[in-house]
Image (spheres, rainbow, N blue to C red):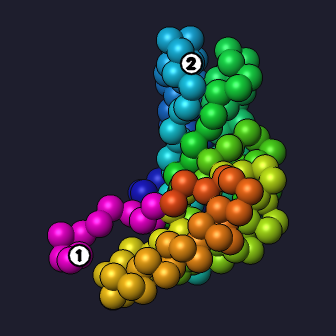
Amino acid sequence: MDKLFFDFMENKSFAYYLLDYITEMRRFQIRRLVEAGVDLVHLSDDMGTQEGTLMSPAMWRERFKERMRSIISVAKKVNPDVIIFYHSDGDIEKIIPELIEIGIGVLDPVQPEAMDPVKLKREYGDRLTFWGTVGTQTTIPFGTPEEVKKVVKERIETVGKGGGLLIAPTHWLEPEIS
């Protein structure tokens, strides 16, 4: 990733060629998957850190948004009801409205350490389903069983109210988790 980010600045034509090549491969793959009958497709980019997006929203728009839109549009052309499940760690709140605009239906994960799940539900819950919301950096490794249950219950009552929540840990559970 660091080499790609360097190429964005020093060798932009190569970086964009690479992204275009990957986009065309993904367009082919997603079309074939949806033609085969899958009803959910998983895309992944990791555009966030704990403090915000890896790049400005303007840079994300220039480099990734339209490429993602073209991949999603291929799937939606085959089956308008196909669900697009998108994975990005961290705080990507600044680009969530645009992810919805291009066809993302499920956001994975919603890390409570980086984004407020209740706020996201309030602002986008009528257009987006949320995966996660139970922190693997806070609640699960450091909470008592009662505290974990309390957070899960709270998330179901708030983020899950009216549907649109796939309650889960935000990431894999590490071996040291009791």
For the point 71% across and 63% down, the residue is: 161
Read off the magenta span. Answer: 168-178
Question: In the depicted view, which residue is nearer to us: 24 or 74?
Answer: 74
User: In what quadrant of the picture does the N terminus appear?
Assistant: bottom left
Question: In the depicted view, which residue is nearer to us: 36 or 178?
Answer: 178
Residue 171 magenta-drawn? yes
Q: Is residue 178 left or right of residue 89?
A: left
Dividing the picture into quarters, in which one does residue 74 lie? Answer: top right
Q: Is residue 7 left or right of residue 55?
A: left
| 21 vs 54: above or below | above
Pick whichever of labels 2 and 1 is earlier in the sequence: 2
Residue 159 x/y as whole percent: 66, 66
Q: Which element is circle 2 on?
A: helix
Residue 8 x/y as whole percent: 57, 55
Real-space Cα distance between discs 2 and 1? 37 Å
Residue 92 x/y as whole percent: 64, 66
Residue indicated by mark 2? 34
| 133 vs 24: above or below | below
* Structural crowding at the residue carrying mark 2, measured as other residues with C-alpha within 10 Å and reported as few (<14), some (14–19) or many (≥20): some
User: At label 1, which amino acid type do we have?
Assistant: Ile
For the point 76% across and 41% down, the residue is: 102
